[in-house]
Image: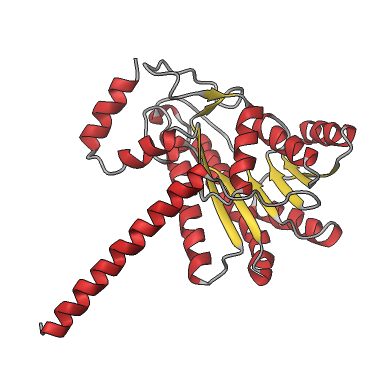
Amino acid sequence: MGAWEIMAMVVGFIVLNVKAVVLILIDVYHIVFPPEEKEIHGQLVLVTGSGQNLGRELALQLARMGAKLILWDYDENNNEETADMIRQIGGEAYTFTCDISDQKAVAAAATRVRRDIGHPAFVFNNAGTYEHKPFLAHSPQEIRRLVEVNLLGNLWVTREFLGHMVQHNRGHVVCISSVLGFMGRSNVVPYCASKFGVKGMTEALAEEMRMERRSGVRVTAVHPFLISNVNDVKPNLKFPWLFEILEPADAASRIIKGVRRNQEEIFLPEKLKPLMVFSKVLPRKLRRLFGDYMES
């Protein structure tokens, strides 16, 4: 290797480190001075799993901000209840009964949305299902359902509306993953598999948008710990102040704020982010050690 090649490598390494420091400083700056929140008023927003819990809260809070809501849920009655609540506060809502695990049903519902209402600027992939028991206690049908709703449903819905976003270089896809999309735990093996998949999907899609220079199309993954009335498990933890169990209204508010600031990842509670990120650089034995210590 010649002197010029060595010099080029050294310069390249220095430039790389300078860029890394700049990116870190930008992140720190945004922590102190958060970016301006983008406008929701008048935007067409689709929310899946809108019939109850977190999905209902997302829809209601977005409606209060002036968004026009497209509500998807497999439970028609619950979904109509959400729409009625939105209309009572002066909002605009359109309901569709759809099982997002069924690709043909998703395609049919999406066709009706595009034809009758328009192209949503925001898509909140919120619908999901959950089972807590040992892996061998899951039936094949339960495993299939977890993966089809939690992972394939996100893919089918996003696939229907992403094209228009890419064409106009404008839009936002939001997927509800989980802290269990970062770390595997016992008694939730199929659930973890589906949420790890959602995390991979959002990272890959964000990278695809970056490589295609579609900076106006944003992708956000949300990683909640636990949301009351959504997950029926109440863990025993040494530090409950760190692992907050949030109410759906609080969780929805934090999600919407993060989306409006174009955050690529939202942790709930937010204080979990450094812990989750740091845990990925630890060997698995150390992760297990700390995980066992956290659980009382």
- Left or right of residue 209, residue 278 in this image: left
Identify which residue is drawn at 49% across, 43% down. 31
User: Residue 197, how many percent across, how many down?
Assistant: 46, 48
**Looking at the image, is 18 positioned above or below residue 199?**
below
Identify which residue is drawn at 77% across, 42% down. 65
Q: In this view of the protein, which residue sits in the foreground, 114 or 75?
A: 114
Q: In this view of the protein, which residue sits in the foreground, 194 or 263?
A: 263
**Looking at the image, is 228 positioned above or below residue 155?**
above
User: Residue 285, how many percent across, how many down?
Assistant: 21, 34
Q: In this view of the protein, which residue sits in the foreground, 63 or 78?
A: 63
User: Residue 96, how many percent across, how many down?
Assistant: 79, 45
Residue 183 quadrant: top left
Residue 14 quadrant: bottom left
Identify which residue is drawn at 14% across, 78% down. 6
User: Residue 100, how many percent across, how many down?
Assistant: 65, 47
**Looking at the image, is 168 positioned above or below residue 182?**
below
